[in-house]
Image: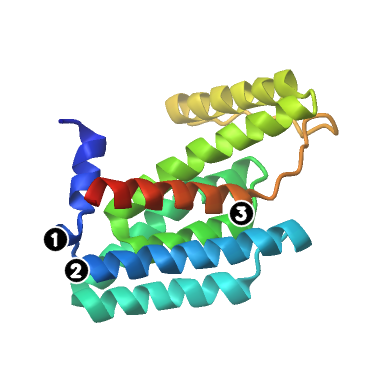
Amino acid sequence: MSGWLPNLLQAAQPGSLSLGEGTSLLVQWGAVLGASLAAAVWDLRQRRIPNALTFPLLGSGIAYSAWVGGLSGAAGSLGGCLLAALPFVVLFLYAGGGAGDAKLMGAIGAWLGVSLSVVALLAVVLVGAALGLAQAAWHKRFADVTGRMGNLARSWYLWFVSGHRTPAAPLTDVQQLQMPYAVSIFSGVAVAALGVMLWNA
């Protein structure tokens, strides 16, 4: 099988991980699954993800990566942090996303490194989109939400092509469906972890 996704999964196999052996893979996924589950519960109850969870997760991810992989491990951890957080930072700056979501994804990326962060990020985005559209359909707001997504995509495309971003229209009461996104993050991380484990089985 060829292609970029199989290559990423191949790079994530325990024998080729820069952060250690197969045990390290279990530690990495165990840490991010536990933390993202805690964040999902917290977000459901309080509608926020506390720094008391994300900052220790970030620091411990970098420290663990450095302990297992030395300087290259620490560099991979920082790369994973930036990669996983960047789309959520953009959403926070330009589309009303949550800062806690961005910090949580960055901390998850610090534990997973670059290759595994790509897999986790793809899973989180796809699962989040599916859950968001399902919620919109449940509340009979599917057309409103998909219309706003189209407007945001056009705005970002014009910004990328011309360098001038057209401000997105403010959210209306109809469009502003509040979904604790940490639930999507946990669900996506769980899907990614299961996929990687099955691939390596």
Q: Report the disc number at residue 15.
A: 1
Which one is in front, 62 or 1? 1
The amino acid beneath tag 2 is: Glu
Q: How many marks?
A: 3
Q: Residue furthest front?
A: 201
Asked which secondary structure carries label 1, the reply is helix
Sequence-earlier tag: 3 or 2: 2
The quadrant of the picture occupied by the N terminus is top left
Q: Would residue 39 appear left or right of 83 to someone viewing this image?
A: right
Asked which secondary structure carries label 3, the reply is helix
Q: Would residue 110 appear left or right of 7 to someone viewing this image?
A: right
The amino acid beneath tag 3 is: Ala
Sequence-earlier tag: 2 or 1: 1
Q: Are marks 3 and 1 in contact (CB under 8 Å)?
A: no
Residue located beneath label 3 in the image: 182
Residue located beneath label 2 in the image: 21
Depicted 107 relative to depicted 159: above or below: below
Label 2 Cα crowd, 10 Å radius (few <14 / some 14-19 / many 20+): some
Q: Are marks 2 and 1 in contact (CB under 8 Å)?
A: yes
At x 27%, y 52%, the residue is 115
